[in-house]
Image (tube, grey):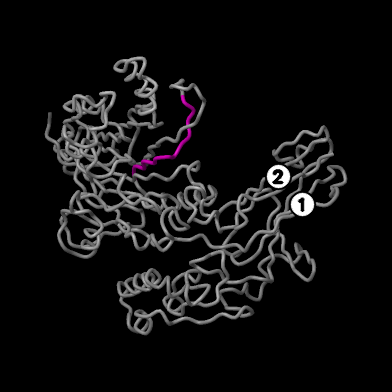
Amino acid sequence: MLSVLRVHLPSDIPIVGCELSPYVLVRRPDQTVFTDDVPESSPIEGHFLRYKYRIQSDKKVAICSVHPSEQATLQCLGCVKAKIPVAKSYHCSPKCFSDAWQHHRVLHERAASAVNENGNEEEEIFGRFNNNATSNASLSSSQSLPSLANGATPLYPAAATQRSGGETWFEVGRSKTYTPTADDIGHVLKFECVVVDAETKSPIGHGSTILTSRVIPAPSPSPRRLISVSNVDVAGHLDVDGRSSSTGTFTVLSYNILSDSYATSELYGYCPSWALSWPYRRQNLLREIVGYRADIVCLQEALYKKKTAEVFNGSIMTIDGCATFFRRDRFSHVKKYEVEFNKAAQSLTDALVPSAQKKTALNRLVKDNVALIVVLEAKFSNHGVDNPGKRQLVCVVHTLLKGLEKIAASADIPMLVCGDFNSVPGSAPHALLAIGKVDPMHPDLAVDPLGILRPATKLTHSLPLVSAYSSFARIGVGLGYEQQKRRVDPATNEPLFTNCTRDFIGTLDYIFYSADSLTVESLLELLDEDSLRKDTALPSPEWSSDHIALLAEFRCKPRTRR
């Protein structure tokens, strides 16, 4: 008959909204093993697997908002009075609360700002605790706060209870997977798997059981604001639909979401293992990306694709790729071009490099980089266009310049070049993109043993590309502006960083646009380093990539009739 050899969960810390999908290793009667499900509808030799999830309902505790794997011992009264989500008010120790105060007080300040905008009295609610970190209440281990109780009515049906050793367990699921809810926070979960006789419906032998840690809430970073840079002196905000109300504008998001193959404890040992797991990161990234409600989304390290041809060593591997998404109610697809730079490297070495040096050249050039060009047609109207009957096309590019000049010459199309270029401001690749040429004396060109980059005069283009985030360096004074200007490097007019790990901080990601056809209306605010360093670096429980997302709102310039 069937027998269960092993059961385990990818992470023993369940998180609200993140599906639990256990690994179950099963042995068939012929001694072969497999991990596929055996449902009642498809038994194997008269047996199937039954699953149950139970929750330990009578031992709920509050969870620390900073260290979610720790039990809370105190609660910030300021958060309670300000009606900030209760999960953010708990801390595991006075030191935890004190260390987190610099960032925690931002919750109070934003809540105070919202109160003022609604016309209420700020002093009545915030005056007594907005400037110190001492307003908190201790929680004893046996204390039951109203926010922790399930109320007079049992949350789970009494018919599905199990009592074991004085403990009460309520059944909450009967499938192989389970997604914890907010009602589960602070509870321990139990997963059970047992072989069942298909005819008698009776369990065979003892089942396998796993106990989890207490369910924790999913960390929720403070929303990033959209800052207007179109000659106004107030900060813009993402509206309920996630974008400007102007019909003639559109938003573009570029985000390196960190490939799952790179999200390891070896590389990011400072990030909790549960926050590196793909089920958690997937849910957190989706929530963030969907929240931006961008019209065009450009993701890097997003896909895996088998190489379509042998490039050097002939091994079959997968590579991370890029993907472009767009709102079908705002754009329609016209054309796309896909490029694998490994193929281009192979062609270049075949044409220019002597046979004896090809291996060295390919080692230098083959980096598994890819590019994607997408031509879209806008469905929205642009009131400034002088040619109202003309199609409004937009060319969205993932890290590729060669060939774009031909597209620009053959069609009157605004262009966006987005991506992670792995190049800091001032580097040769950045210079090529930002100013259209590379100084022949640039230090990056000094190391070119194969002569691939020579002559330097070929490293040019005529596209009028400008970095969208350089707009922050040109804005005046006003609400939110000075803060953003401090997060831009005055020497390069680029963000101080878009990538922040323990060992590196700098800018690698950009959104370039054709300045002759587009103007920047708004930019997603940049993050400050201090707010990220409270978790050491990126990725973290709040932010699930080692890069930050960039988002820009554009307007098409009026174009003359051709």
**273 left or right, relative to 476:** right
- Name the foreground residue: 356 vs 209: 356
Give percent across and percent down for residue 273: 54, 54
Q: Main secondary structure of the magenta part?
A: strand
Instruction: Where is residue 56? Give x, y as percent.
Output: 69, 66
Quick one: label 1, few (<14), some, or many (20+) residues within 10 Å? Answer: some
Look at label 1 and name its amino acid: Ser
Q: Nearer the viewer, residue 62 or 413?
A: 62
Give residue 208's mark: 1
- Residues in magenta? 295-307
- Which sits in the foreground, 501 or 107? 501
* Three-letter amino acid code of the residue under disc 2: Val
- From this viewpoint, which residue is outermost toward the right? 200
Q: Which residue is mark 2?
A: 24
The spot of residue 278 in percent (x, y) is: 53, 47
Residue 320: image x %, image y %? 44, 36
Tell which circle, 2 or 1, labels the residue nearer the N-terminal end: 2
Pointer 2 with pointer 1, Cβ within 8 A: yes
